[in-house]
Amino acid sequence: MTRLILSIAVVFAVFVAMVSCEKVLDIDLPDAVNGIVFEGYIENGTFPYVLVSRSSNYFSPINTAAQAIVDALVEADSVFIEFNGNRVELPKICLSELNDTLRAEALALLGFDELPPGLNLCLNANPLIEGQFGTTYRMIAYVEGKEYNAVTTIGQPVELDSLWYKDELPLDSNGFVRESAGY
């Protein structure tokens, strides 16, 4: 009989311990800033392109990833790139308007194999411009009546004068690549 009472007491103690550890957390999350986001790219040997979207609340529910992308995209009034005294427009290009070969190249450049069905991605790009080392580029974009600016420079490549490898045997099978022999 005492074993039964002891077993019931242990089960009751475990139950009380589990119930008493529960705590309701009520976290008041801040609203997201309603801002315009520019994802601009230009590298040596590639043409510039800019995706314009609107920021969204991280904790907002979404239906699908494709729909979230479509909802976030914003059409720019106009986008320009200035470099070496030239001002060139980056016109709107929608992937659905490209032939299969150009669409595949654009998707590869953007890091996609393919787009989800129903997603028509548009960006501002100019394939007639090619990024060059040592050149400074200024983006001027007009979105919803406001002007936005950004500046970047494609720096000159830095050549390494020497590299050497030091293994970490017997402690580890990996090693380190060093850039000077004085280490």
Image: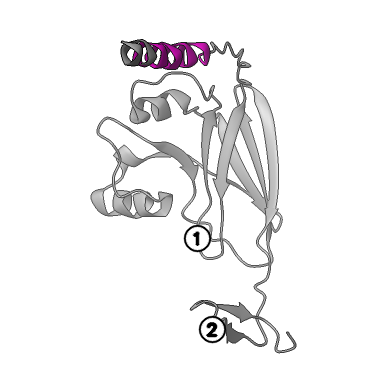
Labels 2 and 1: the sequence-earlier one: 1
Q: Residue 168, relative to residue 45: is it above or below?
A: below
Return the residue nearer the eye: 8 or 81. 8
Q: Residue 75, image x and y in percent?
A: 49, 28
Q: Is residue 13 magenta?
A: yes
Label at residue 92 = none
- SS class, disc 1: loop
- Amino acid carrying label 2: it is Leu
Question: What residue is drawn where x is 32% and y is 32%?
Answer: 119
For this view, does 17 lie left or right of residue 70?
right
Question: The C terminus lies in which quarter of the figure?
Answer: bottom right
Q: Residue 27, relative to residue 89: is it above or below?
A: above
Question: What residue is drawn where x is 60% and y is 16%?
Answer: 29
For this view, does 136 lie left or right of residue 104?
right
Residue 180 in sight: yes
Q: Residue 55, image x and y in percent?
A: 56, 26
The region drawn magenta spans: 7-22
How many labels sit on residues? 2
Q: Residue 52, relative to residue 82: is it above or below?
A: above
Q: Residue 42, image x and y in percent?
A: 56, 55
| Residue denoted by label 1 | 46
For this view, does 86 lie left or right of residue 6?
right
Residue 92 in sight: no
Return the residue nearer the eye: 24 or 2. 2
Q: Residue 21, relative to residue 99: is it above or below?
A: above
Quick check: marks 2 and 1 in contact, CB under 8 Å? no
| Residue denoted by label 2 | 169
For this view, does 59 lie left or right of residue 111?
right
- SS class, disc 2: loop
Q: Residue 13, image x and y in percent?
A: 45, 14
Dot 2, how many residues are within 10 Å of its Cα: few (below 14), some (14-19), or many (20+)? Answer: few
- Amino acid carrying label 1: it is Thr
